[in-house]
Amino acid sequence: METINTLLAIDPNYIVVGLIILFFVLETFFNRREREHVGSKINHLFHNFLFQLLAIATGSVLGFLVVTTFDGISTYQLGLFNLISMPYWFKVLAGVIILDLSDYWLHRLDHVSPLLWRQHRVHHSDTSMDASTSFRTFPTDIIFFTIGELAFSVIFGLDIMSMNIFLFLLFPVLFMQHTSLTYPIWLDKAFGWLFMMPNYHKVHHEQDQYYTDSNYGTLFIVWDKLFGTFKTKPVQEINYGLKEFEGAHKQSFFYQLRSPFINIKRVEE
Ligand SMILES: [Zn+2]
Ligand SMILES: [Zn+2]
């Protein structure tokens, strides 16, 4: 636990900035298409990074709500896990799994509800996906996920350590899932029975809604397999983004910011 505490004490913003620089360098080095369009890649990163600045501002407000909720759970011994005695490590691990389950259902709701889709389509709108797409999330979508995760935390009586570990893993996982780096297929065979592999999350970013409405999991693939939403498609055949967001103007931060308030019809293939 000591090592975990030391890792969790690092300012997450430093980790995020360090990792996005690392992924930018790797993507430019290993991907010829990215190297040839490095100017537009920098522009793309800039627009997506503006969303991360909004996320930091949103997170600083939400942080108070998160800490207060977990304080309440522990003070009043709320939730299912507090009714049963279990080892602390087990409670923490089970909590991470529960948070991933909550994200699965919240993500599915984002796709099913036309109102929630308005905020969530911002993340799907990226037509030239790379690691920086991880930043492109509308602030209300972050609020929606956090409040949903806190509701699950109260019901199950989770420990704040589970949330800290989940958030610590989130950005490294998101960068790996959205990067334009190509991964060997054997990785999917070795780890794809348990984890949401990058090649599976990329299917979730396919324009064709049949595939967009699939692979909702964040860390684990098991929820999609269990609830029948797991789909595959060869990565090289994926058309990223949404047809209705094609064009430089619609890829800009300011258009994206306005987009949830504009009536935009879903354009089918
Ligand atoms: Zn989605
Ligand atoms: Zn994504």
Image (spheres, grey):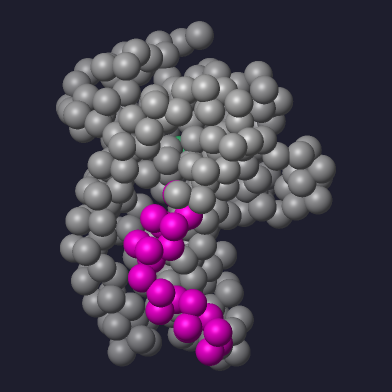
Q: Is 7 included in the stretch rendered in magenta?
A: yes
Percent x, y for residue 81? 50, 80
Vertical placement of residue 130 versus 83, above or below: above
Q: Would residue 131 be found to the left or right of residue 137 on screen?
A: right
Snapshot quadrant of residue 118: top left
Snapshot quadrant of residue 110: top left
- The reply to whether residue 155 is in sight is no
State which quarter of the image contains the N terminus: bottom right
Residue at image location 67% in from the left, 22% down from the top: 236
Residue range in magenta is 1-20
Q: Would residue 192 be found to the left or right of residue 215 on screen?
A: right
Q: Is 91 included in the stretch rendered in magenta?
A: no
Residue at image location 22% in from the left, 24% down from the top: 255
Percent x, y for residue 91? 55, 80
Q: Would residue 153 be found to the left or right of residue 233 on screen?
A: left
Vertical placement of residue 165 versus 179, above or below: below
The kind of secondary structure the magenta stretch mainly shows is helix
Which of these two is toward me, 57 or 106? Answer: 57
Residue at image location 48% in from the left, 54% down from the top: 19
Which of these two is toward me, 71 or 239? Answer: 239
Percent x, y for residue 155? 40, 70
Vertical placement of residue 92 versus 171, above or below: below
Vertical placement of residue 199 versus 76, above or below: above
